Amino acid sequence: MTRPGELPAARTRLTVATGPPPAAFAQALAELAFGGAGWPGLLAALAQRIGAACRLVSEAGELLAASDGAAGDARGADPDDVRRALAGSRAGGGQVAGAVAGRVRCADGWTGRAVPVGAGQRRLGALLVAEPVTAGQLDLARAATTALLIDAVRRESPPPPALADAAAVLRALRDGVRPPGPGDPLGAGAPPGVAGSGRLAGPRGFTEADLLRAGATHGWRLDQPHAVAGIGYTGAQQRRWASALSWLDRPVLAEGRRAWTLLHGEDVEREATRLRARLDQIVGVGQVRVASGATVSGAARTAASFRDADRLLSLLLRQPDAPPELSFGRAGLHQVLLAVPDERLRWFVRRHLGPIAHRDDLLRTLDCWLATGGSRQAVSERLHLHRNSVGYRVGLIKRLLGVDPLDPDTATVLRTALAARELLAASDPG
């Protein structure tokens, strides 16, 4: 018979034996917390791991979160039970594996065993695990306390004053994050295993926790899927452009003819279309281009989406006849090449296009020749050339490169080299 508050999975304890050990589980939950997961999400992960429902209560018995979504005073714990359980746990070494956990009853009749949640002088309350409880489950619950404290510190700490402005948050996201250090709220006084998470350092010096809190003040859930949108203006009326950006339903970072913002939701491409349509209504149709980077989760990954959006926008602005939007998901070969270092791309272009790399006429001809499957007529129409001129250029390309562009394997290599050259040219500030 299933007890109140116990998950059906609690009938079998195989998950406790087959999952990662407590130390690895603690690290995994800490990563979730750094990524923005709150108490409910962390408790849900713990409940799934141990096969039993969990609740987090304050020292006064207030219900802070529950794995099953329980809420309200009616689900809170008896304060005397909590105090006795915590006192007993601390006296008996409550954070030590195998220590006895005190029993706590909640107002709705739910009962669980208490694991203290605290570090040093910081005391959050108790993590309750639904009865019946095994020693292995309690060890995993103790491993979860670090992650719960991470979210507690984040809730208490306001974002740095330097991130009060939305544009400053976007700049910091573009620069990247650094790992927490001794001077941070999650640094010197943090629970074991919290500081030094190995995040990439950024010149602005903000941690991922800083950016998550700052983003939340502007309505951005950076722990949820999002993508950076780069917006380019091709018109001549700068004042109208600036005014149009101010009328958007989201904060932006404006930098001359370009601007940056974040897109949320499952369909960022639709969001990008809606964004461009709104700007078109103000500045005029056909004068706005929008490129979006990869969809990511976590503030530490937003910088990569920024880089993608920046390069794709540059590529889009170099192609006036192209569609007005280019998303990461529709970038074709460029989607793959964005992850390749520029030095490797340059080598690839030199290796396969070297003899004609500085001949724009031959490069355009090669591109059209590959795109049309070797049709002289189609190439002549696209480039406004005589058919004989097309034949001459193609012959010259074959002679200089020493290959037949229409050979299937060769064609793949040449298309990739042309795409890499386009990406490098779009990234060149000159």
Image (cartoon, grey):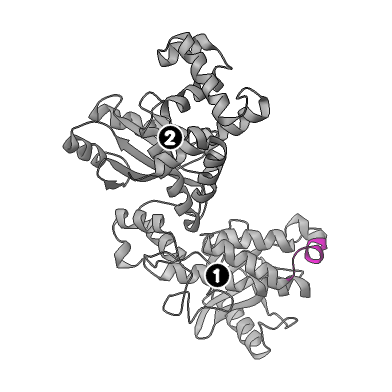
- In reply to whether residue 303 is colored magenta, the answer given is no
Q: Is residue 216 visible?
A: no
Label 1, on which residue? 197
Q: Nearer the viewer, mark 2 or mark 1?
A: 2
- The magenta span reads 13-21
Q: Where is residue 166 shown, x and y percent of the image?
A: 31, 54
Label 2, on which residue? 358
Q: Is residue 310 above or below residue 276?
A: below
Please report contact status of discs 2 and 1: CB closer than 8 Å, yes or no: no
- Which residue occupies the foreground of this view, 362 or 198? 362
In the image, is 138 to the left or to the right of 225? right
Q: Is residue 354 above or below residue 137?
A: above
Residue type for callout 1: Ser
Q: Where is residue 248 shown, x and y percent of the image?
A: 29, 39
Quadrant of image for the N terminus: bottom right
- Indicate which disc, 2 or 1, sits on the residue closer to the N terminus: 1
Residue lying at the far bottom of the rendered structure: 91
Q: Is residue 243 visible?
A: yes
